[in-house]
Image (spheres, rainbow, N blue to C red):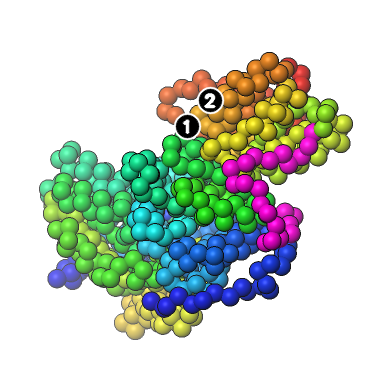
Amino acid sequence: MFDPYVADIDAEALRGLYRDMVLVRRGDRESNAMQRQGQLGIWVPLLGQEAAQIGSGRALRPQDMAFPSYREHGVAYTRGVDFRELLGIFRCTDHSGWDFKAHGFHPYTIVIGNQVLNATGYAMGQKFEGKVGDDDGEATIVYFGDGATSQGDVHEGFVWAAVYDAPVVFFCQNNQWAISEPTERQSRLPLYQRARGYGFPGIRVDGNDVLACLAVTRWALDECRHGNGPVLIEAFTYRMDAHTTTDDPTRYRLSDELEVWKHKDPIERVRAHLARTGGADTAFFEAVQAEADSFAAELRDFCFNMPDPPPERVFANVYAEPSPQLDAQREEYLAYLSGFAEAGEH
Amino acid sequence: MAAPVKSHPVEGPASAVQNLTIGKALNQGLRAAMEADDKVIVMGEDVGKLGGVFRITDGLQKDFGEQRVLDTPLAESGIIGTAVGLAVRGFRPVCEIQFEGFIFPGFDQISSQLAKLHYRTQGKVKVPVVIRVPYGGGIGAVEHHSESPESLFAHIAGLKVVSCSNPVDAYWMIQQAIASDDPILFFEPKRLYHSGALKAPVDPSATPDPLFASRVVRQGGTDAAATVVAYGPSVKVCLDAAAAAAEEGRSLEVIDLRALSPLDLGPVFESVRRTGRLITVSEAQSESSITSEIAARVQQECFYSLEAPVLRVAGFDTPYPPAKLEEHFLPDLDRVLHAVDRALDW
Ligand SMILES: Cc1ncc(C[n+]2csc(CCOP(=O)(O)OP(=O)(O)O)c2C)c(N)n1
Ligand SMILES: [Mg+2]
């Protein structure tokens, strides 16, 4: 059923997906390392989820909109958000840097589940504006985790989307863990089966198979584009690293589990396939490797040289309209700060 | 589920004096409360096997079993709403909210049910629920991990709100809160959890101060220049400021509120009548806050003693900024002393 959705993926396109995954993994590993070196406050690794993110992200069209949680660095990359633009959040210089309209990529959302309702509302808007109904229709995709499925916001998102036929793909990356809690702590039922109760299709896809993720997401987006949304996709994958750099997974899970999933590594799989079928030669793999190296070096260089924001930024953009009260607070504080400068740093 | 296992103290006899951090004191206090009453249960995200992201519940599930320490699904409305039901049934739930910024999905249950059941039932239903909330900034974290929302809860009639600032209070206040028949929001200064500098001997055979009592933590003496009132993480800032002021020959009286709702302002009035000046310090924004309440009541009770208006040092009326800017947002020693200078020069 889904094969037609990837019929166009020839060896060259597959090499492209491979390259995408290698680059985002490299960006992820480099960022993780930079956190260890004190350059980032925290890092949220995507290791192991490259296929789910690249496959689904590459299924999107320019007119589509994506709502990420906080781990979707791979999706960000497919939306043309430079990996470097993600670093501000984790270096704690900003809360969100990129132009979400230009990229069709909403700011990261940290409060679990919130973005599911926001995405649903956005999709309702696409429908209300008549942008749904043919091949060129618009669609929205929203990313969340297995743990998030317990939140009321996610349930309500499902209800709203069903009632308003919203063109939204609910893309759940079931990476088996919500910090220390396995998916069984959230559900008796495989998560994709929940969709049935809301009256829309739910499907589980091998989240470590980039082609499968691409095919299923293209299909789901098409359904939405044509006015047959919403759709729930459960991408069955694995969080191969810690929850974040502050987490210690040895306290709650066995390394055996990781070993099993290593055999399903999403990148190795494509690499093996390309090598076996002659879809790529050694020179290609070496070139991608070299590209990843310079990608990482640029990321590093950028990160190490990121300027701290100025103090007046604290007060900026709290409101869209002027706030005399905040203006006064800002002026008072800046005057206070310049008092130190005049007195000479003490 | 495993049957509850009878607990055993892990570190020597329960009566031994131990030198504890705030985090460890909370852990010991929770343990003591669970030993004293088998209706006390702990529930929250990652509180079991992991021991909570701050390890405050470390070891409790191992010793008390999975029916008394619940790794709940990921939903704060669920945690608090079911805690209300469990309390109606006769349990004494202690809920952990992972970070203060994630309490809001549970806000409805707190405000609509937890706070009002006793009133609505004319006292027939008691809801002895404690909600533990790690709060405050200064940890270099991403969004929603550094806020101070305590005033929102103090504003709700039917709730009590407290905050500890040191290990001895942490140990006793958590037990007193659990023993109380009223619902209590228990705010914990997260950046001080593991502060070795604050370690203090905790004597389980001592008699604690009452829960809802403020305390003078630094006497200003008869020539005290000003009164400084704080709570939670700001108490340490104020004590440091007072120590610095003392070196300049200026004596400050510092009061730790401990109880935020109801407020125990008797000691504050007494102090302000002597000093004539009051500075309040909080990380929370000052607009419509606990410190607004203090200022209003002090001007009412101490009107003829005041030599200067009540001055408030607080977070600015902005969202919590990216952490690279938090040093500007958070009241520090200099800003406290600056306010003291202003009060004295008035
Ligand atoms: C409302 C809310 N509660 C708690 C948290 C703390 N928290 C951050 S990530 C997380 C687990 C999320 O698990 P899942 O939804 O499976 O996503 P994953 O991190 O595995 O990608 C928790 C509990 C939060 N961010 N928001
Ligand atoms: Mg997960």
Neighbour tally class for label 2: few under 14, some 14-19, many 20 plus, Cα within 10 Å: some
Amino acid type at image mark 1: Val
A259 to A36, vertically: above or below: below
Quadrant (top left/top right/bottom left/bottom right) for the N terminus of chain B: bottom left
Read off the magenta span: B192-220
SS type, badge 1: loop
Marked residue nearer the N-terminal end (1 or 2): 1
B284 to A286, vertically: above or below: above
A264 to A115, vertically: above or below: below
B208 to B307, vertically: above or below: below
Residue displayed at 32% across by 71% down: A236
Left or right: where does residue A107 sit relative to residue B328? left
Q: Which residue is mark 2?
A: A326
Label 2 CB-ligand 1 distance < 8 A? no
- Callout 2: residue from which chain? A
Judged by its main secondary structure, the magenta piece is: loop
Label 1 CB-ligand 1 distance < 8 A? no
Left or right: where does residue B176 sit relative to residue A343? left
Based on the picture, tell me whether residue B215 belongs to the magenta stretch: yes
SS type, badge 2: helix
Horizontal and vertical percent for residue B28?
61, 64
Q: Say yes or no: labels 1 and 2 on the same chain.
A: yes
Q: Quadrant of residue B83?
A: bottom left
Based on the picture, tell me whether residue A200 belongs to the magenta stretch: no
What distance separates the C-alpha of mark 1 from that of mark 2?
A: 9 Å
Q: Which mark is residue A318?
A: 1
- Callout 1: residue from which chain? A
Q: Are marks 1 and 2 in contact (CB under 8 Å)?
A: yes
